[in-house]
Image: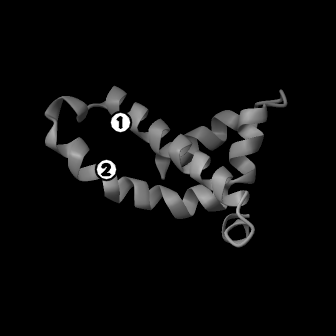
Amino acid sequence: FVNVLCIFVLCLGHTRDSKLIRTISCNTRGIYFLHEIFIQLTKKKILTYAVLCNIPCNLIYSLFILFGSLIITLLMKKTPILKYLVS
């Protein structure tokens, strides 16, 4: 929760029109639905390696979850039946 709040505060002063930020913001529902599935599928594997349990690796892991969920959401939007679930 604190991470999301910090990112929100950082983006408040963002005045440039960024295509990446716009894409993420337009697909937040799909990312929200899918991120927990990705976390549950990968958490056991990540926790088995102690070297991956630090802050830099957690940041990379969270970006992987974010962009993985975003890619699946964008693919789901191209499917006629599934696009109503994520848009």
Q: Residues within 10 Å of mark 1 (few under 14, many from 20)?
A: few
Which of 28 and 34 lies nearest the eye of the viewer? 34
Q: Identify the secondary structure beneath mark 2.
A: helix
Residue ID for mark 2: 42
Instruction: Residue 50: give x, y in percent of width and height.
Output: 15, 34
Q: In the rendered image, which quarter is residue 46 located in? A: top left
Residue 63 lies left or right of residue 50; in this view the side is: right
Which of 13 and 30 lies nearest the eye of the viewer? 30
Determine whether 49 is above or below 28 in the image: above
Q: Identify the secondary structure beneath mark 1.
A: helix
Which of 83 and 32 lies nearest the eye of the viewer? 83
Q: Amino acid at mark 1?
A: Asn
Instruction: Residue 44: give x, y in percent of width and height.
Output: 22, 51
Name the disc covering residue 37, or none. none
Determine whether 2 is above or below 34 in the image: above
Q: How many marks?
A: 2
Q: Residues within 10 Å of mark 2 (few under 14, many from 20)?
A: few
Residue drawn at x 22%, y 46% as measured from the top left = 45
Residue drawn at x 54%, y 64% as measured from the top left = 33
Name the disc covering residue 58, or none. 1
| Spatial separation of the CA atoms under disc 2 and disc 1 | 12 Å
Residue drawn at x 78%, y 31% as measured from the top left = 18
Determine whether 74 is above or below 83 in the image: above
Please report whichever mark, 2 or 1, sits nearer to the chain's N-terminal start: 2
Residue drawn at x 64%, y 43% as measured from the top left = 8
Q: Amino acid at mark 2?
A: Thr
Residue 11 lies left or right of residue 41; in this view the side is: right
Which of 35 and 16 lies nearest the eye of the viewer? 35
